Image (cartoon, helix red, strand yellow):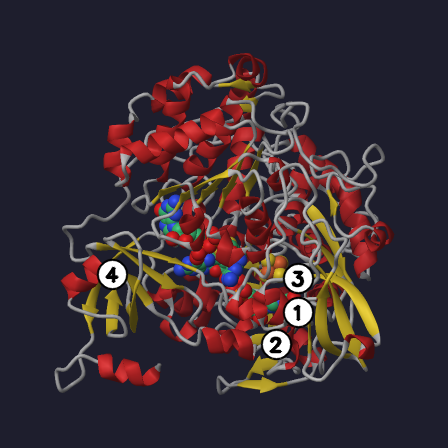
């Protein structure tokens, strides 16, 4: 057992180094409330951490219906007992400042406490009257990557088969829409090819825009245990900042923000010129090689060095490491997904693996990462811009399958155009065509780009806003109805991490006051709306999480994310099971595409694809003409210059992101003393060069301005790339999103949260002096 304070001083905990191909050793981390000993705990309840997409297995300790701590589960395939700072301390937020009563906005505009029945009646009245007057398209739903599979599936059914609205998406659009899009474009469907076990087998690790050391600390611990072992893999880090990952890297490529496509094109060209392409494999299992080779040909190291602002020799060194690796493993995250040409850049990483046939084998894998703990479930279950079971909205047969499963007319299920993406959903609300917006498990008044605009939309008289959350937030403050939500540990459900590992999280304690699970809220809403199947049965007809789960896995049968043999019972006996889980693979599947047959058959694929440059959709006929038939698609496009340039009023590039202690808008981590104390307020990272030019030193207050707004915060001088400014996005009172713009990737529709032109100026006090002294006083 390790010292409970370790994770603040050392987020990764003690090393357990080991050799390639050997199992990752166990290390059990535990943290209990002061004065409580392990032997005092009355019950240990099976769960997993919900503070990032790693999904570390843990047990919740309970005494007298109170959560008193957590303990990592030694036999869990994801963490082997380890927990990071958020996992170890995050549970402390569950009993602080909770919403316990529903709130309803009264005639004077105040949110007042009411009972559940009054709040739900107000929601149903508004929904009914809109449905009669304006139809299902007046309704929109914006959810999360933090609810449970059972909840997403149930909401998907209510929205698609009950109301018949295509306006449903998750904050997953801001998070991992590009992960999904890149896998759909390359492999034909969403679904992570690789496995975390690949870390034990790889001989080269490539991290593309992924600050894993701060954002999945236990995954980094797993990598560190190889890096500190006898035969460490090479490590390549692509990030404009000298992060902890960069510090450990064999090669660090500190690219200029927004130039990822030039970089991957350069790496691809170098592989081809090195003769590292496995031509037999490529011929047998892919299409598009010649077009790809032609697109990347102009990206020689000198040119890429110029565009990306990196040393051409470093690019060549990174390409050589990939070319020589026996088993390269790549991870991709927000530095790619939230930047310029997001899907094209992420697809570029898939291409590198396909060209060398490095996929579906131990150690050789791609991890198009997730961020939120249950983002994967929203994508699978179809409460985001996808249909359940990775079905293709543009394929009549797929829609008919759903109509059959739900016993409704196929016409009810909207499929005349792609499901509405989050940015468009807010646009419809702004324009007045969506008048009812239900938001669950997300805080858009801090996390969406261009906050001034988002706040205006949420405050509009023309939109009836329903929010369910566990805490009062910037978003609940703007709602018309607020439902207090049951949190993790207060309800039962399943969720799936970034490498397809499903965990069951059982209810440990009762929710406080009148708080209810999102599942119960949506089932209650549906009952009162009296949605029915064709044969007159209530829709949805299920009531409990386990019944919802059974319906969901039934809907997944035969699809790439087939979980038809998965049950709660099985999940109680295996600590984490990777889908597909079928009669043929009853305890799960480590890797996809081990037979190099991809999901690109026209009748089976999740999408017919897009033009990566413009986002134009490929039609069914065009897709069929490709004759991909199970072969992966190699796709590349030229780099286009990122918007903004140094000679404008906004000469610096703002990138935003995370710090190790905080989760998103801090509704949980801001209520945990250990975490909040270590990172109590926002800051602005500048390079020493830029700070010198602006005339500020560490601790000085600066104002960061963009065409949209401005924030003020103290300076930190770091090894961020000159010309680049980094601001964490966690702090509602100094929100980075006051600065970001309304712009998104043409394919994945993921907003560009990491690419805004800004200027930075010193803040001076009224007396005209710098505020450095005042800052020093704050610290
Ligand atoms: N502590 C903590 N952990 C978390 C979360 C959290 O809020 N806090 N959130 C979870 C969630 S939902 C997510 S999505 C993940 C996100 O996990 P990450 O993607 O690892 O985190 P970010 O800090 O958003 O961005 C990663 C890196 O992208 C770099 N970057 C910015 N622009 C570019 C670019 O143009 N090119 C390249 N190559 N890199 C660039 C940034 O410098 C940053 O270090 O973290 C998860 N884990
Ligand atoms: N500038 C900038 N903006 C960003 C990002 C960035 O890197 N830069 N990252 C983006 C990314 S990747 C993400 S994932 C988003 C995250 O953005 P958000 O999802 O808005 O952030 P959270 O603070 O996690 O909000 C989740 C809310 O759900 C509540 N909640 C938790 N569990 C439950 C539950 O079970 N039921 C209900 N009803 N509520 C619950 C929490 O209290 C919290 O208020 O931010 C995005 N915005
Ligand atoms: S790595 Fe992620 S899932 Fe694991 S303990 Fe940390 S926050 Fe939780
Ligand atoms: Mo995310």
Q: CA distance from mark 4 to mark 2?
A: 36 Å
Q: CA distance from mark 4 to mark 3?
A: 38 Å
In the image, is 278 to the left or to the right of 402? left
Query: Residue 124's mark?
Result: 1
Residue where numbered disc 2 is placed: 93
Report the residue at 74% width, 81% height from top. 36
Q: Looking at the image, in which quadrant does ligand 1 appear?
A: bottom left
The residue carrying mark 3 has its beta carbon less than 8 Å from ligand 3: yes
The residue carrying mark 1 has its beta carbon less than 8 Å from ligand 2: no
Near mark 3 (Cα within 10 A), the count class, few <14, some 14-19 or many ≥20, is many
> Label 4 near label 1: C-beta < 8 Å?
no
| Mark closest to the chain's N terminus, 1 or 3 | 3
Q: CA distance from mark 2 to mark 1?
A: 32 Å
Q: Is residue 466 visible?
A: no
Query: Residue 707's mark?
Result: 4
| Mark closest to the chain's N terminus, 2 or 1 | 2
Near mark 4 (Cα within 10 A), the count class, few <14, some 14-19 or many ≥20, is some
| Mark closest to the chain's N terminus, 4 or 3 | 3
Picture layout, residue 361 above or below residue 492 = above
Mark 2, secondary structure of its residue:
helix
Q: Nearer the viewer, mark 1 or mark 3?
A: 3
Residue where numbered disc 3 is placed: 49
Foreground residue among 392 and 176: 176
Picture layout, residue 767 above or below residue 193 = below
Mark 3, secondary structure of its residue:
loop
Near mark 1 (Cα within 10 A), the count class, few <14, some 14-19 or many ≥20, is some
Q: Position of residue 362 (x, y in %)?
A: 65, 32
| Mark closest to the chain's N terminus, 2 or 3 | 3
Quadrant in which residue 539 is drawn = bottom right
């Amino acid at each position: 057992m390790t010292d409970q304070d370790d994770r603040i001083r050392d987020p990764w905990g003690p090393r357990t180094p080991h050799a390639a191909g050997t199992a990752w050793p166990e290390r059990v981390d535990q943290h209990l409330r002061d004065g409580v000993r392990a032997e005092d705990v009355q019950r240990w309840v099976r769960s997993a951490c919900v503070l990032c997409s790693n999904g570390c297995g843990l047990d919740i300790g309970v005494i007298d219906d109170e959560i008193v701590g957590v303990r990592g589960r030694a036999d869990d395939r994801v963490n082997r007992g380890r927990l990071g700072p958020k996992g170890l301390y995050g549970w402390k937020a569950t009993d602080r400042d909770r919403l316990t009563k529903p709130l309803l906005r009264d005639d004077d505009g105040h949110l007042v406490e009411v009972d559940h029945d009054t709040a739900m009646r107000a929601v149903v009245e508004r929904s009914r009257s809109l449905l009669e007057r304006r139809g299902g398209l007046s309704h929109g739903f914006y959810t999360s990557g933090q609810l449970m599979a059972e909840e997403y599936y149930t909401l998907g059914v209510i929205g698609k088969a009950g109301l018949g609205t295509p306006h449903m998406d998750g904050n997953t659009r801001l998070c991992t829409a590009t992960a999904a899009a890149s896998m759909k474009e390359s492999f034909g469907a969403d679904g992570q090819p690789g496995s975390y076990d690949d870390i034990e087998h790889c001989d080269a690790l490539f991290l593309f825009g992924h600050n894993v050391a701060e954002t999945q600390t236990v995954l980094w611990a797993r990598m560190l245990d190889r890096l500190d072992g006898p035969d460490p893999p090479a490590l390549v880090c692509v990030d404009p900042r000298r992060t902890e990952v960069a510090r450990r890297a064999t090669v660090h490529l500190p690219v200029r923000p927004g130039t990822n496509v030039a970089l991957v094109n350069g790496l691809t060209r170098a592989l081809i010129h090195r003769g590292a392409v496995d031509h037999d494999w490529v011929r047998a299992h892919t299409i598009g090689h010649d077009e790809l080779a032609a697109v990347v040909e102009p990206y020689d190291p000198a040119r890429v060095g110029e565009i990306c602002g990196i040393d051409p020799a470093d690019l060549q060194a990174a390409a050589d490491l990939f070319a020589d690796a026996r088993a390269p493993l790549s991870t991709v995250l927000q530095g790619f997904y939230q930047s310029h040409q997001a899907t094209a850049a992420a697809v570029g990483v898939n291409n590198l693996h396909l060209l060398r046939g490095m996929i579906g084998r131990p150690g050789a894998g791609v991890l198009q990462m997730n961020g939120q703990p249950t983002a994967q479930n929203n994508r699978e279950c179809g409460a985001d811009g996808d249909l359940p079971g990775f079905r293709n909205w543009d394929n009549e047969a797929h829609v008919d399958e759903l109509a059959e499963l739900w016993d409704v007319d196929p016409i009810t299920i909207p499929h005349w155009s792609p499901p509405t993406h989050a940015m468009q959903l807010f646009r419809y609300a702004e324009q007045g065509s969506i008048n009812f917006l239900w938001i669950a498990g997300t805080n858009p008044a801090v996390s969406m780009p261009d906050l001034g605009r988002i706040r205006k939309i949420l405050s509009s008289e023309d939109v009836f806003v329903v929010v369910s959350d566990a805490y009062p937030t910037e978003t609940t403050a703007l709602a018309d109805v607020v439902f207090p939500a049951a949190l993790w540990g207060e309800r039962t459900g399943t969720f799936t991490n970034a490498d397809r590992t499903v965990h069951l999280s059982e209810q440990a304690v009762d929710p406080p006051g009148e708080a209810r699970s999102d599942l119960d809220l949506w089932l209650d809403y549906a009952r009162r709306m009296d949605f029915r199947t064709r044969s007159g049965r209530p829709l949805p007809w299920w009531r409990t999480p386990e019944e919802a789960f059974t319906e969901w896995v039934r809907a997944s049968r035969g699809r790439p994310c087939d979980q038809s043999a998965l049950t709660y019972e099985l999940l109680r006996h295996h600590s984490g099971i990777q889908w597909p889980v079928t009669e043929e693979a009853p305890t799960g599947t480590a890797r996809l595409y081990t037979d190099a047959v991809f999901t690109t058959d026209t009748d089976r694929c999740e999408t017919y694809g897009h033009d990566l440059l413009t986002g134009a959709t490929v039609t069914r006929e065009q897709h069929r003409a490709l004759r991909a038939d199970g072969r992966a698609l190699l796709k590349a496009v030229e780099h286009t210059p990122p918007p903004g340039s140094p000679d404008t009023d906004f000469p610096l590039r703002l990138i935003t992101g995370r710090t190790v202690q905080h989760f998103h808008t801090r509704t949980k981590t801001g209520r945990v003393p250990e975490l909040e104390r270590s990172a109590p307020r926002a800051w602005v990272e500048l390079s020493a060069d830029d700070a010198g030019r602006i005339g500020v030193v560490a601790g000085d207050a600066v104002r960061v301005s963009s065409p949209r707004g401005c924030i003020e915060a103290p300076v930190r001088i770091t090894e961020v790339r000159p010309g680049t400014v980094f601001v964490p996005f966690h702090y509602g009172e100094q929100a980075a999103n006051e600065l970001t713009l309304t712009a998104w990737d043409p394919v994945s529709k993921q907003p560009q949260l990491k690419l805004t032109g800004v200027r930075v100026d010193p803040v001076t006090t009224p007396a005209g002096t710098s505020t450095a002294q005042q800052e020093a006083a704050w610290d």
